[in-house]
């Protein structure tokens, strides 16, 4: 289970990573394995609903058991499947990069969702945060 201390380290590092690279303002959501919000950070200047998009990336990754990069591929190859999973996930599934599973010793202990810049940059910030916490990032393939 992702601890609060791990979640803060992930979010703080992801934010620093983004600021050092000049990313647009971000929303960062860190969930534990039960999909409970451990940390939600939204920078000034983000559009309305940006945190909900970040949550959808993280929650979708947990719901499907794969990083959101894999969900994007599935959405292109099997759109009806993704629509079905989105339905049972009460809409909280955003199938674009930026939703990254957090693994410890191979087990999923949570997920990070980031939204605000390009999906690839969102994902890079999430990976940086997870790795800084000494955990393994799984963005999907």
Image (tube, rainbow, N blue to C red):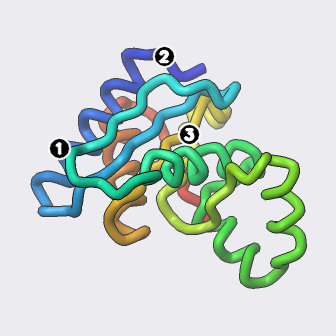
In this picture, is 73 found above or below 49?
A: below
Q: Residues within 10 Å of mark 2 (few under 14, many from 20)?
A: few
Residue 74 falls in which quadrant of the image? bottom right
The foreground one among 1 and 48 is 48
Give x and y (percent) for residue 93.
68, 55
Q: Earlier in the sequence, mark 2 or mark 1?
A: 2
Residue placed at 69% from the left, 43% from the top?
A: 62
Inter-mark Cα distance, 2 to 1: 20 Å
Residue placed at 41% from the left, 32% from the top?
A: 40
As drawn, the label of residue 111 is 3
Residue placed at 35% from the left, 30% from the top?
A: 133
Q: Residues within 10 Å of mark 3 (few under 14, many from 20)?
A: many
Q: Which residue is mark 2?
A: 3
Residue placed at 40% from the left, 53% from the top?
A: 48
Q: Are marks 3 and 2 in contact (CB under 8 Å)?
A: no
Question: In the rendered view of the protein, which quadrant contains the N terminus?
Answer: top right
Q: Are marks 2 and 1 in contact (CB under 8 Å)?
A: no
Inter-mark Cα distance, 3 to 2: 12 Å
Q: Earlier in the sequence, mark 3 or mark 2?
A: 2
Q: Earlier in the sequence, mark 1 or mark 3?
A: 1
Q: Secondary structure at mark 1?
A: helix
As drawn, the label of residue 16 is 1
């Amino acid at each position: 289970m992702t601890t609060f201390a791990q979640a803060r380290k992930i979010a703080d590092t992801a934010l620093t990573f983004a600021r050092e690279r000049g990313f647009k303002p971000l929303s960062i959501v860190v969930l534990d394995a039960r999909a409970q919000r451990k940390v939600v950070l939204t920078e000034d200047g983000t559009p309305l609903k940006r945190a909900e998009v970040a949550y959808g990336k993280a929650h979708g990754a947990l719901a499907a058991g794969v990083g959101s990069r894999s969900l994007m591929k599935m959405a292109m190859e099997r759109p009806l499947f993704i629509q079905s999973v989105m339905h049972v996930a009460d809409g909280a599934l955003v199938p674009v990069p930026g939703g990254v599973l957090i693994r410890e010793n191979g087990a999923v202990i949570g997920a990070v969702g980031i939204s605000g810049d390009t999906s690839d940059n969102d994902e890079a910030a999430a990976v940086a945060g997870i790795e800084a916490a000494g955990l393994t990032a799984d963005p999907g393939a």
